[in-house]
Image: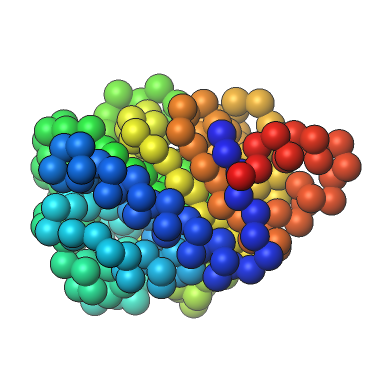
């Protein structure tokens, strides 16, 4: 695991975008194409603002999508498909795009995505970490041994509250309660994983991720088992780990 902490979300986002760009260019140079997995949410805004400016041959990039609400249409402002269309796909026009359509039968969508995923390894995964330390929509306790690539999940109360807090829904009652989510084992198949985690509301999740042993109750601890995982934080999300004196030596070892 590697750790990057910067004072502002803008600095953090720019460095994460630079890192992702380098990995994509390396994959294209070696294999002629790159496969990437993208997450969404308010925490990813600073990353996408810089990422779409990257000097990449996007025609050689194949993009996959982490999760989407069951039943939501792309016209809904909370749709992650809409999020990626507006902030990435329709800006850089990747060569291939595999978005999750929330209006289609989940079983059909999962089967189609699984078939595409099995064609080649994923080069780069942008994996956000939720306020309850979820990865994708794998809320605690997460299944670290699922054999599927995607599955339908029921969202935990704190996860639903996060969606309201970020402004995607006006209330928990208005929020979609189920989603199609990539599973934890499938996420771990990415060659490299980058997690962009800004904002004070994520400071507890960052602290638990760094200080907890591997545990389904803190799903993001699984990322620490990956051979090439980098966590990007701003000063706000790193607040709790920076204020813990006992962690400073460990932070120094991990920091780049």
Q: Is residue 25 above or below residue 117?
A: below
User: Of 44 and 101, which appears nearest the observer?
Assistant: 44
Q: Is residue 250 above or below residue 99?
A: above
User: Of 29 and 139, which appears nearest the observer?
Assistant: 29
The quadrant in which residue 138 appears is top left
- Which image quarter is the C terminus in? top right
The quadrant in which residue 197 appears is bottom right
* Residue 241, percent from left and from top: 76, 47
Residue at image coords 39%, 38%: 192
State how many labels appear. Answer: 0
| For residue 73, side relative to residue 183 (left or right) | left
Residue at image coords 41%, 69%: 50
User: Of 90 and 61, which appears nearest the observer?
Assistant: 61
Residue at image coords 12%, 33%: 119
- Kindly give the residue lying farthest to the right in the view shown: 245
* Residue 196, percent from left and from top: 51, 55
């Amino acid at each position: 695991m590697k750790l990057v902490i910067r004072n502002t979300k803008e600095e953090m986002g720019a460095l994460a975008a630079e890192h992702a760009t380098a990995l994509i260019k390396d994959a294209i140079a070696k294999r002629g194409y790159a496969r990437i997995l993208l997450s969404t949410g308010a925490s990813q805004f600073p990353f996408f603002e810089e990422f779409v400016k990257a000097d990449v041959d996007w025609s050689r990039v194949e993009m996959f999508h982490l999760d989407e609400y069951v039943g939501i249409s792309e016209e809904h402002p909370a749709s992650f498909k809409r999020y990626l269309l507006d902030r990435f796909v329709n800006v850089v026009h990747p060569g291939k795009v595999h978005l999750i359509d929330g209006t289609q039968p989940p079983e059909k969508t999962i089967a189609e995505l699984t078939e595409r995923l099995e064609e080649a390894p994923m080069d780069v995964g942008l994996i956000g970490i939720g306020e309850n330390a979820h990865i994708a929509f794998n809320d605690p306790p997460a299944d670290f041994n699922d054999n599927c690539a995607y599955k339908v999940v029921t969202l935990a109360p704190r996860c639903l509250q996060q969606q309201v807090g970020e402004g995607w829904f006006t209330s928990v009652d208005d929020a979609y309660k189920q989603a199609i989510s990539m599973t934890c084992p499938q996420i771990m198949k990415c060659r490299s994983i980058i997690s962009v985690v800004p904002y004070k509301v994520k400071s507890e999740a960052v602290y638990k991720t760094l200080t907890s042993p591997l545990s389904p109750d803190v799903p993001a601890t699984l990322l620490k088992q990956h051979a090439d995982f980098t966590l990007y934080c701003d000063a706000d999300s790193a607040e709790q780990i920076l204020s813990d004196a006992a962690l400073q030596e460990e932070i120094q070892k991990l920091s780049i």
